[in-house]
Amino acid sequence: MEKGRNSLQKTVKIGKYLVKVNDAWKIFLFIGVIVNLILNYNLKQIVNDQEFSLHETNIKVYNLLIENRDLKAANQELLNNMVLFNRSFEDFSLPIWNKVKRGYFFYSNYFNPAYEEKYFTPKGLNRYENLGKTNYNVTDVDCATICHANDMEVALSGNAKSYTEPLIHHEDGTKYYVKVFKWRTIQNNKDTLVYGMELPKDK
């Protein structure tokens, strides 16, 4: 009976099994090794994933920097081409601009230095900051609609024509009228450009 009790004391229960004490510590050691391997593997996997994610992020940032550099270069080339195409107006004393027709709207495509000096410089702006805008982006709906209708008439008919158009130039929103002369050109056999020139007040 005493021998049986001593035999039981040399066993431990693991799950539903009775295991001898001499074997139990080996099992626990084995389980510990396995758990340690699993934890180390997961930790390495996490580190590897983070390193890969960081590497991938660096590649994306680098590609964005390259893309931004290329866009700046392309934009500068477009600006240079714009000035080159309109070089005959660069030294003209009267404000001149043009808009390119895209669908239903006309987008500002060029302003000569005289236009910049009169309308943009007093506001601390330059002529390039207003490119790509429509009449509706820079003035109220009533003024924009009148200017847009005149642009559309010239674009569709191809006939040059003078108009009196409203402008809002003053900081307090005061509206005043200017006499403009508009004409159409077709660039590269596809782009419809509508030019405008502000006429002197005594004309």
Image (cartoon, rainbow, N blue to C red):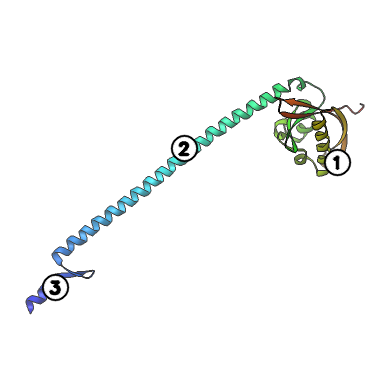
Answer left or right for 125 relative to 46: right
Residue annotated with mark 1? 174
Query: Could you say which quadrant of the image residue 103 lies in?
Result: top right
Q: Nearer the viewer, mark 3 or mark 2?
A: 2
Query: Could you say which quadrant of the image residue 172 lies in?
Result: top right
**Residue drawn at (7%, 76%), measured in percent from left and top?**
3
Quarter of the rendering occupied by the C terminus: top right
Q: Is residue 101 above or below residue 31?
A: above
Q: Secondary structure at mark 1?
A: loop
**Residue drawn at (31%, 54%), measured in percent from left and top?**
39
Q: Looking at the image, can residue 42 be seen?
A: yes
Residue type at mark 2 is: Ile
Instruction: Measure how far apart labels 3 and 2 are at the Cα level.
Output: 63 Å
Residue annotated with mark 3? 9
Q: In the rendering, which numbered label is found on residue 182?
A: none
**Residue drawn at (88%, 27%), measured in percent from left and top?**
200
